[in-house]
Amino acid sequence: MSFSAETKNELARITSDNPCCNITELAALVRLAGSIQIVGYKKLNLKITTELNSIARKIFKLLKQNFGINTTISVNKNQMLKRNNSYVLMVTSEMGAEKLIKELGILAPGDGFYTLNKVPTNLMEHDECKRAFIRGAFLGGGSISDPGKNYHMEFVTNNEDFAESLKELINSFGFNCKIVARKNNYVVYLKESEQISDLLSIIGAHNALLSLQSTKIVKAMRNNVNRIVNCETANLSKTVNAAVRQVENIKLIQATIGIHSLPENLQEIARLRVEYEDMSLKELGEMLEPPIGKSGVNHRLRKLEEIANKLRD
């Protein structure tokens, strides 16, 4: 199961004792997952579709508890490979679909069917209702990427005005949502891991939040390890290349003027460098008598390199 589906399953299990929160959550769910069907003169049905049975059960429960509507859940089996089944709830005209949609702030009150393309702020008595609406919007048309791959959370709607209104609602909690057009839809999205974490906390997805933070820590540790390894590898490569060059210089001196022609201190370091090619400068310095530091060894090896370069010229 994807990270997005796990997050939705967690959110679908959240219950509230406040009827206003339940209604606002259902309003967002219907807005993003529902469609209105005209079935006759001044008659319409409401069709709600979701790919998760946990969300279907939640919608069924919210309809029954808050509006006394007993509907049914049907399953549409998808024959396409790797596609999930879909769960469909139908609220017919006889069940009171028109009244329901108007109470949820999707259709304007009065005669006629005029859609309201704004977040129904009149249904929100306090911040908890706003959180419930955002949660319902995510359940109805949201998704979140696997944090192991990238950080991206979005809400997909087919109306630009509603997308703008939803963006303003989310941003009222201090976020920085943006909107992008994608085909025939408008997507409200977040990309920063910290903001996604905060939004998951606000809508109650605490397990998903912990999972995201854990993955983020592991990724940070892995990046640090890789950075350290790359740095060590680069330093090791630099050290090996320098040692090879130093040995070549000494062998050139030996083949031309001979090591014995060098000053005593240079003869001593030259013999040690050739004999112990894998040793670091510090270790070479400790083997000298008397011992000298890394900078002293480097100074003598540079002298040998100058002599070798003159011989090459």
Image (cartoon, rainbow, N blue to C red):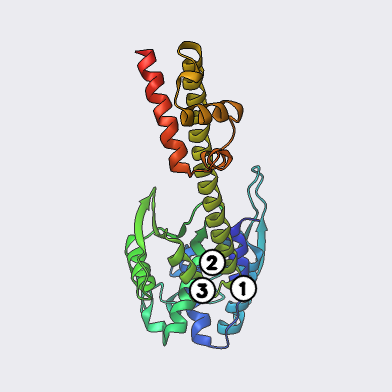
Residue holding disc 3:
201
Q: Which element type, helix, strand or loop, lies under badge 1? A: helix
At x 38%, y 77%, the residue is 120
Q: CA distance from mark 2 to mark 1?
A: 10 Å
> Which residue type carries mark 1?
Lys
In the displayed structure, would residue 292 be above or below residue 241? below
At x 41%, y 76%, the residue is 105
Q: Are marks 2 and 1 in contact (CB under 8 Å)?
A: yes
> Which residue type carries mark 2?
Leu
Q: Which element type, helix, strand or loop, lies under badge 3? A: helix
> Which residue type carries mark 3?
Ser
Q: Nearer the viewer, mark 3 or mark 2?
A: 3
At x 43%, y 33%, the residue is 300
Q: Nearer the viewer, mark 1 or mark 3?
A: 3
Residue holding disc 1:
58
Label 2: few (<14), some or many (≥20) within 10 Å?
many
Which of marks 1 and 2 precedes in the sequence? 1
Which of marks 2 and 3 precedes in the sequence? 2
Q: Are marks 3 and 2 in contact (CB under 8 Å)?
A: no
Label 3: few (<14), some or many (≥20) within 10 Å?
some
Q: Position of residue 175 (x, y in %)?
A: 37, 69
Q: CA distance from mark 3 to mark 2?
A: 15 Å
For the N terminus, the image quarter is: bottom right
Q: Position of residue 109 (x, y in %)?
A: 37, 79
Residue holding disc 2:
139
